[in-house]
Image (tube, rainbow, N blue to C red):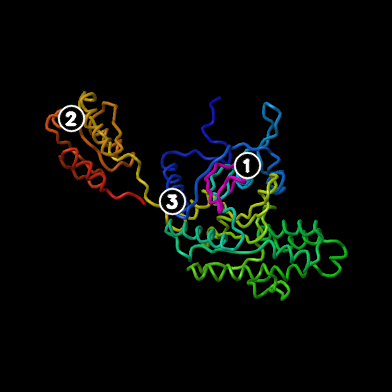
Amino acid sequence: MALSTQPYKGARDFYPPDKRLQKYMFAKWRAVAERFGYEEYDAPILEPLEIYLAKTGEEIVNEQTYVFDDRGGRRVVIRPEMTPTVSRMVAGRRQELAYPLRWYSIPNLWRYERPQRGRLREHWQLNVDLFGVEGVEAEIEMITLVDTMFKAFGATHDMYEIRLNSRQLMDFALREYLRFTQEEAHDISRLIDRLHKLEHSQFIAMADEICSPKARQVGVVEKLLGLLSANSLGDLPPELRDHDSARELVSVSARLELAGIANTRFDVSLMRGFDYYTDVVFEVFDKHPDNNRSMLGGGRYDGLVGLFGVNPVPTVGFGWGDVTLANFLELHHLMPDLPPETDVYAVLVGDILETARHPIAELRAAGLNVAVDLSGRKLGDQLKTADKKGITFALIIGETELKSGKFTLKNLKTSKEEKLELNKIAKIVKEQPKAS
C-alpha cells in the first residue's frame, strides 16, 4: 500500500510559493514590531502541562491540547499558545530585565480542533507583549501597533474594525449588577464568549441552565439579554456606564481617535476565551462580508507572571494568526506578486560548467541569487524551466560569451535580450522592481 502524500490533518505543506507568502507576512510583522522597539524571542515548542492548567482555560487544556508523557514520565504539551511561555520567561529573570519590556515572537502552535476556514490545528502566530506599564498607554501603544501593521499590508480602515471591552467591567456587571455567584459568572462569561456561534434560543436555554432557581425567578436572564443588546457604552445602564473601567474604555477610544484610529467600537460581548485577562480586551474583525470574523485579539493580563512565584508584572499583549492574515489579504486583494528568490537562472550552452563557475561566482559576489541549470538539456528546454519557475532573468553562457566577456541576459517576461558585461547585468537585475 502506497504512503499518503497528504500532510497531517489540520496542518499544511509549504511549497516554495507558500513559503514566500509566509516570509512576506513575517517580514512585515517583524519590521513594524521592531519599528516600535520590540525585540524577538523564542522558546521550546514543548512545555510542562501545568503552566496551561493554571490560567489558560478549560476548553484549551481539556479539548485542544496535544498532551503526552515523555520518556521521563513528565506530562508535557505541544504549546497551543505563547502567553504562558513568555510569562514563564519573564518570571525567570524578573529582577534582571529592564522595564518597560517589549518582546515579540512568531511561534509555531498546535491545537487539536476541527479544521475550518481561518482555523487549523497547526499555525504560526505573531505574539507581541508589553511588560511593566500599568496605565492605558500600554493599550494605546498595542492597538496603534496593530493598526500600523494593517497599514503596512496596504489595508485601510474601512476593511477592518477594532472592538473593545473590559473584563473588569464585565466582571462587575456579572457579579454586582446581575448578582451572579462567582461560579455562575465564570460560566456565563464562557457562554457570552460563544454568543455569536449560538442560536438565540440556544443561548437563552444555556444561560437559563446556568442560573440558580432564585436568579431565574427574578428575571436575571432577561436582564442579561438587555445588557448584551448594548451597542455602545452609552447604551449601558447608568451603574455600569459610570464604572471606572467604562470611563477607561471611553478614554482609550478617544485617545486612539486623536491618533487617527477611528475604526474602534465597544462590543459588550467581547470576552476573550482565556481566564488570565484582567482588564481591557480587544479584537480586530474583518469587515469583508465573506469573512466577517475576528482576525486577532489580546488585552491586559496583569497576573500571569505572578503565577510563577514572583511579583506580578502589568502586561498587555495580542496574538495574530498567519491563517487569518492570509485570508484577509486574499479577500481584500492585498496579496502581493511574490517572485522567486532567484534573481538569475544561468543557462549553459555546451560542456562549460567548470569555466562558467567564475562569472557565476562574480554575480553572486555582486549580491545576486543565481541558480545554474545542470541538466545539459537544449537551450530552449532550459529557458522553459526558468520561465516555469517564475524567474525573470535568464543568463545564457556559452563558449562565445566566456571568450568575449559579454553574456546574453534575457528578460523572460518581456523577451528582451541584451549582450552585456557582468557589472551591467548585476546593475540591471538589481534595479528590477520586487514585491515590497
Query: Residue 245 in the image: x percent, y percent?
Result: 67, 67
Query: Residue 54 in the image: x percent, y percent?
Result: 72, 46
**Which mark, residue 92?**
1
What amino acid does circle 2 point to?
A: Gly
Check if residue 361 falls in the magenta segment. no
Look at the magenta stretch and give its main secondary structure. Answer: loop
Name the image quarter holding residue 250: bottom right
**Which mark, residue 398?**
2
Query: Disc 3 or disc 1, which is closer to the eye?
Result: 1
What amino acid does circle 3 point to?
A: Ala
Earlier residue among tags 1 and 2: 1
Q: Which of 266 and 192 is in front in this view?
A: 266
Q: Nearer the viewer, residue 214 or 152?
A: 152
Query: Which residue in the structure is indicated by mark 3?
Result: 31
Pointer 3 with pointer 1, Cβ within 8 A: no
**Mark 1 vs mark 2, CA separation in Å:** 61 Å
Dot 3: element:
helix
Is the residue marked by circle 1 packed among few (<14), some (14-19), or many (20+) residues within 10 Å? Answer: some
- Which stretch is magenta? 92-116
